[in-house]
Image: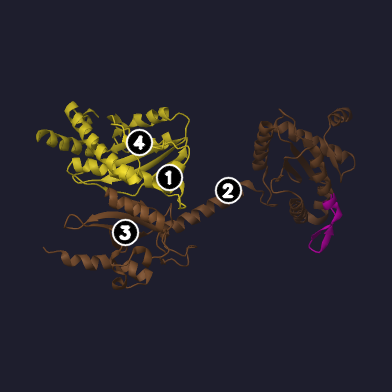
């Protein structure tokens, strides 16, 4: 059976792109898939250099790969996972994809003409846009889940487990490089009364507003987390006790100085803060404990103030107990 | 399992074919990469795939290794998977080797590119020696700078009964470059390979 007639209809209906180049990288053939998407006429581009027709392909890289195919007579490949596309071609998912161009898998295959001497290269282009779109969606979902796994649902600051994990890392870093590190714990004053007066939604609104306000006072490297109901912690890398106390004073003043608003009501709130600086050999729990003790002292001394931990705090606490 | 083992004659024959393919490959690669390529004559060994992960885990103790896989298919049921193992301090070596200096190729792309060149050049030569020819699946990264590469190698290897272990040490002038190649071949393809080797032996 003579099957030569198969070739043309097959190549033109194939749902993959076929380009054939000669050894000088001139176009010998392109199939309908490529011609329609690149909006060129096969007879217009025949004999022209690949790089003159497709001017925006990565020339240096592609040339080197094609040289390899010719010199070694082995196939070469390019995957959309490493290089999203070689040719800027439109795809058929314009609405569901955030990419303008067709993601491509490309095989570069060595061909030898029947004369046994003339070398050619066939570029086979497969549309991988669907796989690309699924992967993008998957990555977005994973990123969203990671974020949700780290943050507190109400306030959007770090949740306790992630925050505490970060504190351990920062302590290790401070220990290793002998850099200063401070911890600041703060608590909304009389939160129970706020809740009783404005309802739990009102209390929640104050927590959200509080976190938003504190965030504006911190550096990018400082880490704010929700430690418990109305108690929060701030990790202050590269900060000694004096610097941490300045931050604490700033937060104290900012919270008390400006009332918050909830459903046309004005809510006055204040915070008490405790500050402790990391000392070599200290554990995560011990550092939190010190900041907590200082916070407790601030509460006892009348709230709406910041207190730095000192060894005497400890003595004082023991006495009053 | 014993049914898959090679006789001494078959093994020697395969070793000889591999040597010839290696010689051809090193010659072609030297011209393509524009540097002297010295390929150490590899000791080939048929091993149980279950032993492979441990073997390589020991060789690359505690180091992170990148694994690249490339599938190959020939006529008469000959098929398998070539695995390349790299342990790279930096990718600059690869970039210079591939002359990608003026390009923004990622490490992943350079690894798949060099793997493709090294495996297909050798395997094409081997196919030729067996009077066969191979087609290839695009290279895939199984593991990238991963200390747990042995687990991933185990996951791949368990699908194959037998591995033809070909350790290649590529030595290139001006470069310090080394990688291992393993050919994983399923049992039925090993039977076919034995038949082919017997045919070659009979023709001498």
- Letter of the chain shown brown in the rendering: A
State the mark number for residue B96: 1
Q: Residues within 10 Å of mark 3 (few under 14, many from 20)?
A: some
Q: Residue furthest left?
A: B203
Eyeballing the image, is A180 above or below A57? Answer: above
Q: In the image, which is nearer the foreground, mark 4 or mark 1?
A: 1
State the mark number for residue A146: 2
Residue at the (13%, 33%) spot, across then down:
B201
Does the CB distance between marks 4 and 1 fall below 8 Å? no
Same subunit: marks 4 and 1: yes
Taking the image as shown, residue A183 lies to the left or right of residue B192, namely right
Label 2: chain? A
Taking the image as shown, residue B114 lies to the left or right of residue B187, namely right
Q: Residues within 10 Å of mark 2 (few under 14, many from 20)?
A: few
Same subunit: marks 1 and 3: no
Judging depth in this view, the residue of B90 and A19 nearest the camera is B90
Judging depth in this view, the residue of B105 and A193 nearest the camera is B105
Boundaries of the magenta span? A253-270
Tell me, yes or no, if residue A151 can be seen here.
Answer: yes
Residue at the (86%, 54%) spot, across then down:
A257
Query: Badge 3 is on which residue?
Result: A124
Q: In the image, which is nearer the foreground, mark 3 or mark 2?
A: 3
State the mark number for residue B170: 4
Q: Secondary structure at mark 3?
A: strand
């Amino acid at each position: 059976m003579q099957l030569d007639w198969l070739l043309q209809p097959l190549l033109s209906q194939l749902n993959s792109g076929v380009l054939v180049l000669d050894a000088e990288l001139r176009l010998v053939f392109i199939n309908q898939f490529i011609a329609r998407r690149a909006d060129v006429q096969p007879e217009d581009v025949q004999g022209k250099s690949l790089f003159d027709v497709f001017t925006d392909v990565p020339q240096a890289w592609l040339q080197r790969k094609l040289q390899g195919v010719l010199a070694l007579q082995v196939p070469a490949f390019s995957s959309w996972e490493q290089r999203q596309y070689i040719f800027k071609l439109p795809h058929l998912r314009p609405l569901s994809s955030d990419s303008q161009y067709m993601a491509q898998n490309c095989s570069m295959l060595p061909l030898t003409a029947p004369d046994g001497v003339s070398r050619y290269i066939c570029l086979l282009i497969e549309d991988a846009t669907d796989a690309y779109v699924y992967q993008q969606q998957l990555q977005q979902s994973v990123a969203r889940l990671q974020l949700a796994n780290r943050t507190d649902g109400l306030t959007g600051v770090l949740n306790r487990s992630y925050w505490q994990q970060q504190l351990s890392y920062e302590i290790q870093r401070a220990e290793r490089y002998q850099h200063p590190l401070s911890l600041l714990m703060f608590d909304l004053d009389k939160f129970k009364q706020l809740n009783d007066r404005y309802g739990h939604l009102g209390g929640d609104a104050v927590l959200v507003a509080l976190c938003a306000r504190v965030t504006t006072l911190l550096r990018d490297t400082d880490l704010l987390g929700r430690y418990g109901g109305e108690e929060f912690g701030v990790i202050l890398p590269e900060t000694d006790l004096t610097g941490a106390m300045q931050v604490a004073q700033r937060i104290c003043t900012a919270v008390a100085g400006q009332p918050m608003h909830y459903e046309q009501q004005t809510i006055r709130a204040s915070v008490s803060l405790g500050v402790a600086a990391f000392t070599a050999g200290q554990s995560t729990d011990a550092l939190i404990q010190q900041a907590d003790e200082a916070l407790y002292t601030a509460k006892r001394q009348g709230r709406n103030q910041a207190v730095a931990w000192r060894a005497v705090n400890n003595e004082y606490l023991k006495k009053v107990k | 399992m014993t049914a898959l083992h090679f006789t001494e004659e078959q093994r020697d024959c395969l070793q000889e074919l591999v040597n010839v393919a290696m010689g051809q490959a090193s010659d072609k690669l030297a011209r393509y990469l524009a540097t002297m390529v010295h390929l150490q004559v590899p000791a080939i060994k048929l091993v149980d795939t279950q032993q492979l992960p441990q073997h390589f885990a020991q060789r690359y103790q505690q180091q992170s290794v990148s694994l690249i896989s490339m599938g190959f298919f020939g006529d008469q049921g000959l098929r398998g998977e070539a695995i390349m193992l790299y342990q790279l301090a930096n990718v600059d070596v690869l970039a210079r080797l591939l002359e990608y200096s003026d390009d923004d190729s990622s490490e992943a792309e350079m690894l798949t590119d060099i793997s493709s060149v090294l495996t297909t050049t050798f395997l094409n030569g081997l196919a030729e020696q067996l009077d066969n020819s191979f087609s290839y699946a695009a290279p895939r990264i199984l593991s990238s700078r991963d200390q747990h590469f042995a687990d991933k190698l185990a996951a791949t290897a368990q699908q194959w009964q037998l591995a033809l272990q070909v350790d290649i040490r590529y030595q290139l002038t001006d470069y310090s470059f080394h990688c291992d190649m393993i050919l994983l071949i399923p049992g039925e393809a090993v039977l076919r390979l034995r038949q082919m080797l017997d045919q070659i032996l009979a023709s001498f």
